[in-house]
Image (cartoon, rainbow, N blue to C red):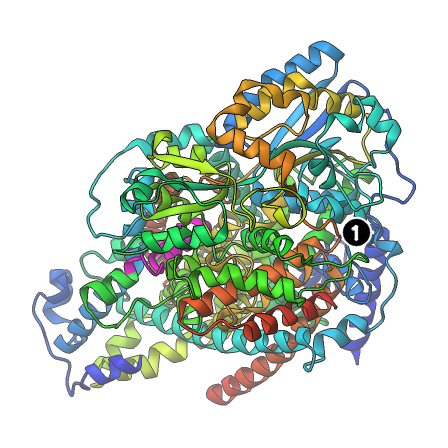
């Protein structure tokens, strides 16, 4: 190493630093993804599961089925897509709001702060399967806690509403997803807040800025770089979340809560038709790529403006 | 443009890597098992007992017995139900799997189509004592008609009607129903004051299918035609599904809350005296676990139109159960066949089915008095006389998902008070059929 | 934040509210930034409500875990009519809980350490260097989060089996394969987050380190890593939890001896019987160490504040 010219060492170093990450991603994500894309052009049903090479090429056939919104498969996919979009936007918004609010309120020291921090991270620590099953218990129509409170104790509803069937299932899913995911937003924002120097607040207070103005002027701008990543990643996760709807509703989610991931599972694993499932996944990937690119462009430009 | 070039390069590299790592999967078309390692076997057992550990305790000594007889050591893995099918699919895809495995018998035709399981032709069957040792309906659930079976029956189960003796007595019902009219009448007499006639698992797709399939048989309808094409919207099929959902929608003998049941809550409702009847496969141990004494419940065959179960329109149960299969890529073909012979032998059949509460598909083993108790007798007679296997088509999984979901949605409609008509049932089933056509 | 804005009138001058919130005496006496009462009330109300929301299911789990099986899924009452500790004794017998727990700990722990180390290197490169292909790298890494996991399950399995056949390296069915998988699951986000944290560490510090004779790696480990410690802890917690909770891949890639907790918990349910009380009891038992870990780490997060307080 010593003998290499400094310039070359400098130029090579970043690649060297990236190499382990790149190799690992290549092995576990990128190559399987390429295989997945290949699968999407094939008629990969159970007949060819043992010998993928023999599966006939279907060219764009799988895609044609997926995007033909006049046929039941395409129409169901489109519906599921809209449900997922609305769900993701709401879930991300709520998670971010709760996480940031909690982190800001816990920014200053007070008695019990450490305990609250750990309490707020509990949903994150509980095994997903057990936590979601517990929510399913709570949302049961006849025996659940939710109807016990709403109907028996507060008498807010006339009859006992279903939460796991029909239109209400969307809200049930939203509540569970937010409950499970917001601690992550909290964790990240909390860590980011540690990097804001205290003096800034003291100085702002001397200038007569109240809490709200401190929040607007100091806290939120400082969180910007972290938020940019956080919101995007939260979005990608909720969009692809499989465990929550699957454990909550089982193989067949109600139409109002039919998220794409379960939908794709049904179109591939449950029906052993991996070609169609892959085609849907690729469409999903393309959509998310576009959204991400637009999001990064918008937020990065905004940031440059703020900096300048 | 630089980015574009870099993208092309990396795409090519990954594509090459993909090919190198073998898009092709493992089970080649010519694979047929070998005898490379004649001393060991790997066996994937399904979870039959109360839990995985209990299964190991049951099977362990038997495998030792097999080892003493043949000198072959069996490596056992008991796989919980939620994982079993995914594990089998992964094994099929990669060719890396066990030598012998248990499969749900409704998967037989689908797994047969993948070519991952060794076909049981006459020669193979002769090695384990011939086809005639097994009851016919169980053999019917081992693969598509006209092909060599993909597996051999191991444990069999059928549906029966369980009823709460005390609740029947309180409602003045002197004998359990044998026809659906009697069942509805009995249900109506019980259904009041927060108690209900019949329990259902509206959210459990497989269960929905099992009930609809049997009612379909009774209406002379099959969900697949002779060529294996789906025909969900025949008059008989629509009437069958409507009859089942009508227990909630019209007859009001199923509690609306059952529409969302999917985790066997209906069994608990039964055990705690909230519903008087439930249609289930061997449920005795579950009732006991929920605190219900064996003397509190009775069991009779599932009702049929004529009152006397039989074949054809008098079918009253789907044939549930477990089959045992040999993986095509096995490295110990002879050993695997010996093991299947051991597991389907009379002695093991008696012992294992007794332990697990199932019925032996092997005729000779059925003679044991353990299969002549109040519940097992009903199950055994149903198995030999009036059970039929689900359609043995490769698309069975898709059928279960699409029609099962349609019935789940219909139950949701009924529970919400929306009308369930012949038209609405037909529309749901038509949608399910279109989803099959992809 | 909107409801907070509605509740909190903008205070004209910082009001002093003695003793509120239990701030240390020295800080309370003369701080120009003591919290106004409206802020304290908003905080109290919000945090109480949030605690309720968070703990409600935990309470249900706890009460379910103390009921006999026949009561568990019966009608809900705030106070269970019959309490029993049997489920807590039975959980160890129904499934090999200790083994699953050990497996999970090994897998999640190793995946976390590896993931954080690899991510620190990559994030340093992304945050401190301008180089060709940087954007491609970040976009590619990010795109891996956009493909549904269920679809690369089978291809990945296939790759592992083929690697195993070619090299004898047992990735399928072993903890190693699972560690490898999980570490890449958390990697993309870890890199992104850490790059953000690193970017907030002033560059002048690196340069000072160079002047002191450190190389790039010296600057990374002596200056940047300590300064971004809270972020690293957050990322580590994330990486750990990703591996700790994953179900789908674990269900296919493990066997009886290497099965992890998240999958193992499903062993409490069989075709006909689900031991709900034991599921809940086992979940709570295995979560205790994790929550305890959070309790320790939250102190560490604060400690990271002083360590990373750069002037």
Badge 1 crowding class, 10 Å Cα cut-off, few under 14, some 14 to 19, many 20 or more, is many
Nearer to us in this view, B172 or C70: B172
Question: Which residue occupies 68% across, 26% down?
Answer: B362
At numbered mark 1, what does the secondary structure look like: helix, strand or loop? loop
> What predominant SS class does the magenta segment belong to?
helix
Nearer to us in this view, C303 or B21: B21
Residue C144 horizontal side relative to residue A300, left or right: right
Disc 1: which residue: A49
Give x and y (percent) for residue B286: 42, 36
Give x and y (percent) for residue A280: 69, 69
Please indicate, yes or no, whether residue B200 appears anywhere in the rendered image.
no
Quadrant containing the N terminus of chain B is bottom right
Quadrant containing the C terminus of chain B is bottom right
Question: Which residue occupies 64% across, 21% down?
Answer: B365
Please indicate, yes or no, whether residue B394 appears anywhere in the rendered image.
yes
Nearer to us in this view, C277 or B285: B285
Residue B322 horizontal side relative to residue B11, left or right: left
Nearer to us in this view, C188 or B235: B235
Give x and y (percent) for residue B287: 39, 36
Please provide the residue range marked out in magenta: A121-145
Total marks drawn? 1
Q: Chain of mark 1?
A: A
Give x and y (percent) for residue B93: 77, 47
């Amino acid at each position: 190493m010593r003998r290499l010219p400094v310039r070359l060492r400098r130029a090579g170093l970043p690649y060297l630093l990236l190499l382990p990450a790149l190799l690992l991603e290549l092995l576990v994500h990128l190559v399987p993804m390429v295989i997945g894309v290949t699968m999407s052009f094939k008629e990969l049903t159970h007949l060819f599961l043992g010998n993928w090479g023999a599966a006939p090429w279907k060219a764009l056939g799988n895609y044609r089925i997926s995007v033909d919104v006049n046929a039941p498969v395409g129409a169901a996919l489109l519906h599921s897509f809209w449900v997922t979009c609305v769900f993701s936007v709401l879930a991300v918004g709520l998670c971010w709001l709760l996480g940031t609010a909690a982190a800001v309120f816990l920014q200053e020291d007070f008695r019990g702060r450490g305990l609250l921090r750990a309490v707020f991270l509990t949903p994150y620590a509980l095994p997903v399967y057990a936590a979601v099953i517990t929510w399913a218990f709570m949302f049961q129509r006849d025996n659940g806690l939710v109807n016990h409170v709403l109907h028996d104790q507060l008498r807010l509803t006339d009859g006992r509403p279903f939460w796991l069937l029909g239109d209400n299932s969307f809200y049930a899913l939203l509540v569970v997803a937010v409950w499970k995911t917001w601690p992550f937003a909290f964790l990240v924002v909390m860590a980011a807040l540690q990097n804001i120097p205290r003096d800034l607040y003291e100085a702002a207070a001397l200038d007569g800025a109240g809490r709200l103005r401190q929040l607007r002027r100091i806290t939120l701008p400082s969180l910007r770089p972290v938020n940019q990543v956080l919101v995007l990643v939260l979005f990608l996760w909720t969009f692809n979340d499989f465990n929550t709807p699957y454990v909550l509703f089982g193989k067949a989610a109600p139409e109002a809560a039919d998220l794409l991931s379960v939908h794709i599972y049904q179109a591939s694993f449950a029906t052993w038709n991996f070609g169609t499932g892959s085609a849907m996944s690729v469409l999903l990937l393309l959509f998310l790529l576009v959204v991400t690119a637009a999001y990064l462009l918008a937020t990065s430009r905004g940031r440059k403006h703020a900096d300048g | 443009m630089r980015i574009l070039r870099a993208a092309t390069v990396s795409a090519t590299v990954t594509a090459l890597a993909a090919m190198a790592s073998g898009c092709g999967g493992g089970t080649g078309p010519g694979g047929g098992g070998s005898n490379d390692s004649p001393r060991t076997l790997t066996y994937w057992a399904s979870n039959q007992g109360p839990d995985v550990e209990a299964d190991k305790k049951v099977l362990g000594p038997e495998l030792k017995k097999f080892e003493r007889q043949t000198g072959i050591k069996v490596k056992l893995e008991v796989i919980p139900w939620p994982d079993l099918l995914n594990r089998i699919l992964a094994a099929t895809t990669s060719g890396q799997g066990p030598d012998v495995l248990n499969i749900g018998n409704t998967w037989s035709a689908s797994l047969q189509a993948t070519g991952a399981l060794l076909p049981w032709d006459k020669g193979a069957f002769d090695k384990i004592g011939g086809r005639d040792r097994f009851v016919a309906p169980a053999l019917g659930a081992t693969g598509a008609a006209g092909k060599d079976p993909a597996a051999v029956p191991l444990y069999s189960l059928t549906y029966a009607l369980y009823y709460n003796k005390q609740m029947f007595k309180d409602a003045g019902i002197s004998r359990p129903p044998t026809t659906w009219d009697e069942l509805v009448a009995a249900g109506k007499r019980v259904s009041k004051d927060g108690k209900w006639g019949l329990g259902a698992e509206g959210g459990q797709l497989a269960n929905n299918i099992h009930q609809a399939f049997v009612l379909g048989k009774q209406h002379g309808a099959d969900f697949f035609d002779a060529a294996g094409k789906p025909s969900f919207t025949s008059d008989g099929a629509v009437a069958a599904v409507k009859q089942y959902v009508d227990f909630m929608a019209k007859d009001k003998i199923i509690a609306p809350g059952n529409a969302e049941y999917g985790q066997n809550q209906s069994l608990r409702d039964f055990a705690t005296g909230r519903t008087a009847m439930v249609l289930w496969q061997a449920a005795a141990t579950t009732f006991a676990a929920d605190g219900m004494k064996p003397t509190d419940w009775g069991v009779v065959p599932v009702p049929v139109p004529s009152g006397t179960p039989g074949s054809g329109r008098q079918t009253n149960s789907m044939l549930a159960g477990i089959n045992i299969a040999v993986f095509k890529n096995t490295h110990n073909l002879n050993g695997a066949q010996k093991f299947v012979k051991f597991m389907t032998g009379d002695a093991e059949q008696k012992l294992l089915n007794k332990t697990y509460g199932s019925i032996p598909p092997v005729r000779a083993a059925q003679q044991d008095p353990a299969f002549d108790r109040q519940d097992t007798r009903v199950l055994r007679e149903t198995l030999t006389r009036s059970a039929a296997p689900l359609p043995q088509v490769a698309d069975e999984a898709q059928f279960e998902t699409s029609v099962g979901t349609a019935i789940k949605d219909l139950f949701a409609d009924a529970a919400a008070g929306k009308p369930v008509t012949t038209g609405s049932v037909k529309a749901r089933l038509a949608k399910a059929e279109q989803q099959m056509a992809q | 934040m909107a409801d907070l804005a509605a509740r909190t009138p903008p205070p004209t001058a910082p009001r002093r509210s003695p003793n509120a919130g239990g701030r240390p005496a020295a800080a309370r006496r003369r701080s120009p930034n003591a919290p106004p009462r409206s802020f304290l009330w908003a905080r109290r109300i919000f945090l109480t409500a949030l605690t309720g929301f968070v703990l409600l299911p935990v309470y249900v789990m706890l009460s379910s875990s103390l009921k006999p099986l026949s009561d568990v899924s019966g009608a809900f009452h705030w106070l269970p009519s019959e309490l029993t500790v049997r489920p807590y004794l039975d959980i160890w017998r129904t499934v090999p809980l200790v083994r699953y727990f050990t497996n999970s700990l090994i897998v999640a722990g190793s995946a976390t350490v590896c993931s954080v180390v690899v991510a620190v290197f990559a994030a340093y490169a992304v945050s401190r260097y301008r180089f060709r292909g940087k954007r491609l790298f970040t976009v590619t890494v990010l795109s891996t989060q956009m493909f549904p996991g269920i679809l690369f399950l089978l291809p990945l399995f296939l790759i592992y089996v083929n690697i195993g056949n070619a090299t004898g390296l047992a990735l399928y069915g072993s903890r190693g394969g699972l560690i490898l998988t999980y570490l890449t699951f958390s990697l993309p986000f870890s890199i992104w987050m850490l790059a953000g944290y690193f970017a907030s560490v002033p560059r002048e510090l690196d340069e000072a380190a160079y002047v002191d004779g450190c190389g790039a790696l010296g600057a990374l480990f002596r200056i940047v890593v300590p300064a971004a410690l809270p972020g690293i802890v957050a990322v580590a917690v994330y990486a750990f939890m990703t591996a700790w909770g994953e179900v789908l891949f674990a269900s296919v890639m493990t066997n009886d001896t290497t099965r992890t907790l998240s999958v193992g918990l499903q062993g409490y349910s069989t075709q006909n019987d689900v031991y709900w009380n034991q599921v809940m009891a086992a979940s709570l038992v295995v979560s205790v160490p994790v929550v305890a870990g959070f309790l320790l780490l939250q102190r560490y997060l604060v400690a990271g504040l002083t360590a990373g307080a750069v002037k």
